Image: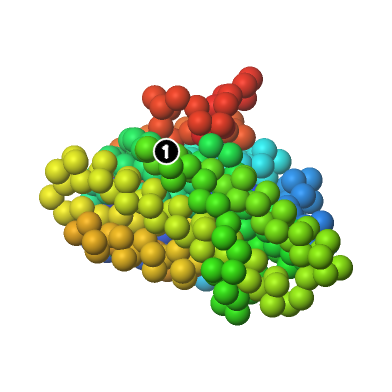
Amino acid sequence: MSDTITILGLESSCDDTAAAIVRAGTETDILASIVAGQTELHADFGGVVPEIAARAHTEKLDLCVEEALATAGLTLHDLDAIAVTAGPGLIGGVLAGVMTAKGIAAATGLPLIGVNHLAGHALTPRLTDNAGYPYLMLLVSGGHCQFLVAEGSDSFKRLGGTIDDAPGEAFDKTARLLGLPQPGGPSVEREAAKGDPKRFRLPRPLLDRPGCDMSFSGLKTALLRERDKLVSEKGGITEQDRADLCAGFQAAVTDVLAEKSRRALDAYLALDTEKPLIAVAGGVAANTSIRAALETISHEKGADFLAPPLALCTDNAAMIAWAGIEKFRAGSRDDMTLAARPRWPLDTSAAPMLGSGKKGAKA
C-alpha cells in the first residue's frame, strides 16, 4: 500500500453541498475544495428548509464532484477511497450524500468510508496544522456546541455543551427577530460592529452554575423582550436600536463561551498535556469577537490557540476527506449497508444532553 492516500470527500449535512479531494503523504494537500451554498434558495424562509436543501444536494452533488476532480486534475481511478458525511444532519441531505458516495463506490470498486460530520470539524486542526493528540476542541456551529477532548481519530471525550439552542441557531433566530438576512451569524456580527454592547444588559445563562454546559435559548428570549419593549414604547426600532441589540447579544454569547472555555481548559490542563492546545471550528468560529476572546483566554492559561482558516471552519468536504484519511489509515471501511444517521454523538459514553428517542441521542 502506498504511503500517499488520496480521498474524495462529500458533505451534504445541512445547506452546503461540497466535494473535496485531499492527498496525504509526507505533506497534506487540499487538491480541491468545492462548496455550493444554498443561501438564495432559503432566503425567503428565514432559515434552512430541509426539503429544499435535500433537493438541491441531489442536483448539485455530482456537479461538485466533477468540478473537484477537474480542479485537482484527477479521475476517479486516481483515488484511494470515498469518504462521506453519514450523519448527523438533516436526513434528506445526509441521505443524498451517502447514496452518491455508494454509487461512486459501486461503479469504481473504491472503498467507502462513512464519517461523522462533527468528527470532520473536530479533526480539522490535524488537517491544517498537524495538531497532536490530545487537544481541546470547541465545536461551535449552527447545530452544535460542545467542548471535546480529541484523544484520537475516533475517540472524543465531551466536557460539556449546549443543553438547548446552539450559538449559530441563536444567531439565526436573532437575525430573524430583527429583520436581518440569513445566515444570521454574519448579519448580526456586521450590525454589532455599529452598536453599543453595554446598552442592553442581556443575561449570561448558566454562568452561575459549575461545569462547562451552556444555554442560549433564554438569551434569545431576553432579546425578544427588549425588542418588544422598544416597539411598545416607540412604535418600532431604529437602526441604532438594532445595532445595539446585536452588540449586546454578541457580547453575551462571547462572555458565555469565554467563561465556559476557561473552565474547559482547566479540566483539559488537568490531564497534564505536554503541549496544550485549544482549537475552535464550526461556523460560529468565524466570528472575530468570539475568536479574539478565546485566543486571549488560551494565552492566559498557557495553551496554544488554533482557529483554522475561515473556509475550513464552516461546512466543507475537505474536513470530511481528512477524517476519511484518518479512518482509512486506521483500517476502517464501510460497505453498502452504510446508513444515513440524523443523530450521531461523538462521545457515545456520555449521557445525552438534548434527550434521545428512537433515532438515538441528539448530542
**Residue 343's image quarter?**
top right
Say how the picture is coloured.
rainbow
Task: Kindly tell me whether residue 21 is visible in this rendering.
Answer: no
Residue 68 is situated, as x and y percent measured from the top left of the image, at 55, 64
Asked if residue 111 is positioned above or below residue 356 in the image, the reply reads: below
Asked if residue 234 is positioned above or below residue 331 in the image, the reply reads: below
Residue at left offset 70%, top offset 71%: 242
Residue at left offset 25%, top offset 46%: 266
Q: Residue furthest front?
A: 233
Question: What residue would you read off at disc 1?
Answer: 209
Q: Amino acid at mark 1?
A: Arg
Residue 278 is situated, as x and y percent measured from the top left of the image, at 30, 55
Residue 281 is situated, as x and y percent measured from the top left of the image, at 44, 56
Q: Is residue 351 left or right of residue 187?
A: left
Q: Is residue 177 left or right of residue 115?
A: right
Q: Secondary structure at mark 1?
A: loop
Circle 1 packing at 10 Å, graded few (<14), some (14-19), many (20+), is few
Task: Kindly tell me whether residue 279 is visible in this rendering.
Answer: yes
Q: Tell me the quarter of the image containing the N terminus.
A: top left
Asked if residue 184 is positioned above or below residue 140 in the image, the reply reads: below
Residue at left offset 78%, top offset 58%: 228
Q: Nearer the viewer, residue 341 or 163?
A: 163
Q: Nearer the viewer, residue 193 or 87?
A: 193
Q: Residue furthest right?
A: 235
**Residue 199's image quarter?**
bottom right
Q: Is residue 158 left or right of residue 232?
A: left
Residue at left offset 63%, top offset 20%: 358
Residue 3 is situated, as x and y percent measured from the top left of the image, at 26, 52
